[in-house]
Amino acid sequence: MRARGVAFQAALAVAGLASAFFVWRREPAGLPGEVVVLDAPRQALKRVRYEDASGQVELFREEPGNGALWLRLGTKPPRELRANETAEQLFTRFAPLRAMRSLGVLNAETLSEVGLKDSPRTLAVTLSGGEHTFTLAAASIGWGSPYLRRETDGNVFLLAPSLLPDLENAAYRLVDRTLHAFGSSEYDVLTVTSGNASHTFLVRLRAQRPMELVPRDAPDSPDETARKWHERVWLLSPAQADFLGRGEEPPGGPPHEVFRVEYRRGDKGLGQLTVARGAGGELYARTEYTAGWAKLPPWADSIAADAEKVAARR
């Protein structure tokens, strides 16, 4: 980069740090020097799509209003996953979309210097009234604060440095790892099934002590082995990158069920966890909440090995 370009970048970096200081010190609305890139109410936001040379990422609501937020990763085939709370917070920042400052319309030479000429990185924000597209500076430009060019009028803006990293690393930052929509205190009956064996346990909560699992057919005989086993089951937590998408099967086809745990509160079913073995020997889990299967860590094999003993009470 030539000396003039370096000076231009340095001046913007200093201005960006000053703006970031005010962002930290004040409330989000009405920041000194802040400009609106896309003025839209939050309820009008339908989809955000980020794309670069390696693929694309989308955040979208399946239903209007407050429907569930989904993440689509541009793998082959595309993978649709539930989005987490970080994604929820990020999504709302695109309507309205704000920048730290406006740089106006830049000439071709300056566009090249800030990484906006022929950049493969794009951003598209879809509102109820249509789609709005932007070009993002090439990642190699550095300096920590991304530049954005609004395609409707060519104006260039300096974005807050915290806006894009989560989209760039969506597979590791934006996937919801939650397995159940209910908590550990909400069920009072669970049934463990493995092969032809099945057993139902009543759950007894105790103050300041671990809960008890009591066989329904032996209410005076708490099963400590079953309790410890289920405690490990409840703590299963696949990594974000190990979740498969909606409708996606593990390599080699549908896995074969090893065991299943069903949860109820009284007569009302709350959900279930199914653990199955794939064609390559790996274990996968899916629940009433997950979009599809999720690969389990190797230590889950010991849980699967003990499932039949718990189900048969051996």
Image: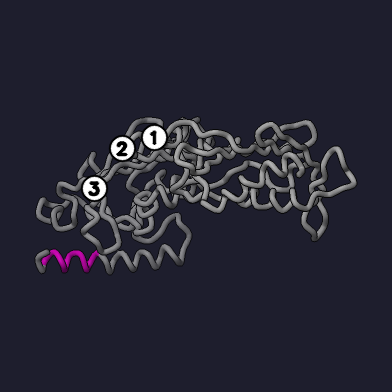
Residue at mark 2: 132
87 to the left or right of 203: left
Which residue corresponds to the image point at 60% horizontal and 35% vertical from the top-left? 288
Front one among 112 and 105: 112
Which residue corresponds to the image point at 62% horizontal and 52% vertical from the top-left? 235
Residue 90 locus on image (x, y percent): 44, 49
Q: Are marks 2 and 1 in contact (CB under 8 Å)?
A: yes
Front one among 117 and 52: 52
Q: Amino acid at mark 1?
A: Leu
Q: Earlier in the sequence, mark 2 or mark 1?
A: 1
Residue at mark 3: 149
Magenta residues, start to end: 4-12
Q: Are marks 1 and 3 in contact (CB under 8 Å)?
A: no
Image: 8 above or below 58? below
Residue at mark 1: 127
Is residue 85 at all visible to an observer of this figure?
no
Is residue 101 at all visible to an observer of this figure?
yes
Q: Quadrant of the C terminus?
A: top right
Q: Quadrant of the N terminus?
A: bottom left
- Residue 5 within the segment the image draws in magenta: yes
Image: 132 above or below 221? above
Say what secondary structure mark 1 lies in.
strand
Q: Amino acid at mark 2?
A: His
295 to the left or right of 169: right
77 to the left or right of 311: left
Residue 277 locus on image (x, y percent): 53, 39
Which residue corresponds to the image point at 29% horizontal and 60% vertical from the top-left? 145
Where is residue 207, by image quadrant?
A: bottom right
Say what secondary structure mark 2 lies in.
strand
Residue 116 locus on image (x, y percent): 19, 51
